[in-house]
Image: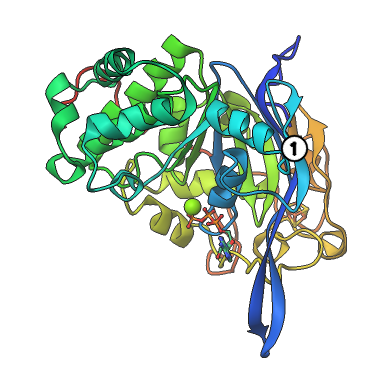
Amino acid sequence: MSARQTSPPEPCALQAENLQRRYAQPGRRNGRDATLQALRGVSLCVSAAQVLAVVGESGCGKSTLARLLSFADAPDEGVLRVRGVVVDPRRREDLRRARAAVQMVFQNARGSLDPRQRVARALEEPLRIHTRLAGAEREARVLDMLQRVGLQAQHGSRYPHMLSGGQLQRVAIARALMLEPAVLVADEPVSALDVSVQAQVLNLLLELRRQLGLALVFISHDLAVVRHVADSVAVMYCGRVVESGAREAVLQQPLHPYTRALLAATATLHGPGPAAGTRMRAAVRGEPPSPLSPPPGCAFHPRCPHAQPRCRDEQPALRELLGRQVACHRAEFVAGLSASTGASAAGSACTDASASGCWTSATSSSDQGPSPAAGASTD
Ligand SMILES: Nc1ncnc2c1ncn2[C@@H]1O[C@H](COP(=O)(O)OP(=O)(O)OP(=O)(O)O)[C@@H](O)[C@H]1O
Ligand code: SF4
Ligand SMILES: [Mg+2]
């Protein structure tokens, strides 16, 4: 998958190939040990100064992917490259360099900061560990970074509990940037914040991306926010990428029935908010499958209004269509490029609205994302 399907292709700041992650589940299957496969072969590329959004319902593997991309966890299979160089997870020096180049911002900033450490000390710590800068230079870098993220010098002397949620997320972003990374992986970075503060933090991230040439992997439940920030989008379902490509293509003319369902779900929501994931789950008919025992063939088939017998038997490969990647046997039909029988036409309303896997109208043209309001922290 490419972050942007333009030519010539941009080199990848971060590239993943066929990432797989399995978790042992002792006693989970009738008292026997089982294996939960959270990632089933994810490939992606994000270029400098680009925002790749990763979306999907709860449990599809987004945070697992974030941990692998930021080298907080190692894949069972697959390869990661930072600026084209393969990272060997068995080599400490490779990992040390990769962790400095790819930093992570978590949903819960409060939980990611040490409550006993003043903000300035928290920001200085990566410099102490990874550089040989003298004290005065470290201090100057900390002050500069506080300013960049819209905070003041006085915030440096505070403890985390003395800051608001928005200010804390700014500190978390500042800390992630102290080592001048090439890539930031942000896992739901605004979903725990008040709606009024979300736009400020989002715009800060976009401004820093522009100023510093950062590649940003932006993980979100919320397609309204994704519309606002992303250059390209990867849609995940049950541990796989099922559609990816440029934002306009994926969000305006989705090819995968699951992407269409997510967009239909977003169209019924009213703007971003902390409960967006819950509401999205409720709006896509049927439950997401358990990664412990996903359905055979296409994992989406029990919820898909276009499913045919082949879908139950054969896992669709990710393939190129209309300038993006899609994993659906019937994507041409869904896109209206070919005729077919036995299923409803693309985007048409279901005749039985009570049926599982039935939804209406595929897209929403309205941009419900927050309005730009970057600048100093008012949160
Ligand atoms: N450390 C772990 N041990 C066992 N199972 C795990 C572990 N981490 C994640 N999982 C499982 O892997 C699957 C994917 O989890 P993950 O947290 O990546 O999903 P997600 O897409 O981030 O969900 P959400 O949107 O709710 O944050 C889930 O079934 C989860 O229970
Ligand atoms: S492969 Fe079949 S079940 Fe899966 S999304 Fe496509 S049409 Fe639906
Ligand atoms: Mg998660």
Q: Quadrant of the N terminus?
A: top right
Give coordinates of residue 37: x percent, y percent. 70, 62
Give coordinates of residue 220: x percent, y percent. 47, 42
Q: Quadrant of the C terminus?
A: top left
Q: Is residue 369 visible to us here?
A: no
Give coordinates of residue 282: x percent, y percent. 45, 62
Q: Secondary structure at mark 1?
A: loop
Q: Residue at x 15, y 31 (%)?
A: 157
Q: Amino acid at mark 1?
A: Asp
Query: Compared with residue 91, is residue 49 higher up or lower down, i.e. above or below?
Result: above
Q: Residue at x 64, y 36 (%)?
A: 95
Residue at the far bottom in the pictured view = 31
Q: Residue at x 60, y 49 (%)?
A: 73
Which residue is at the front of the view, 230 or 153?
153
Left or right, 136 with respect to 278, comes to left
Query: Compared with residue 21, is residue 141 higher up or lower down, i.e. above or below?
Result: above
Which residue is at the front of the view, 91 or 353?
91
Disc 1 target residue: 88
Give coordinates of residue 374: x percent, y percent. 27, 19
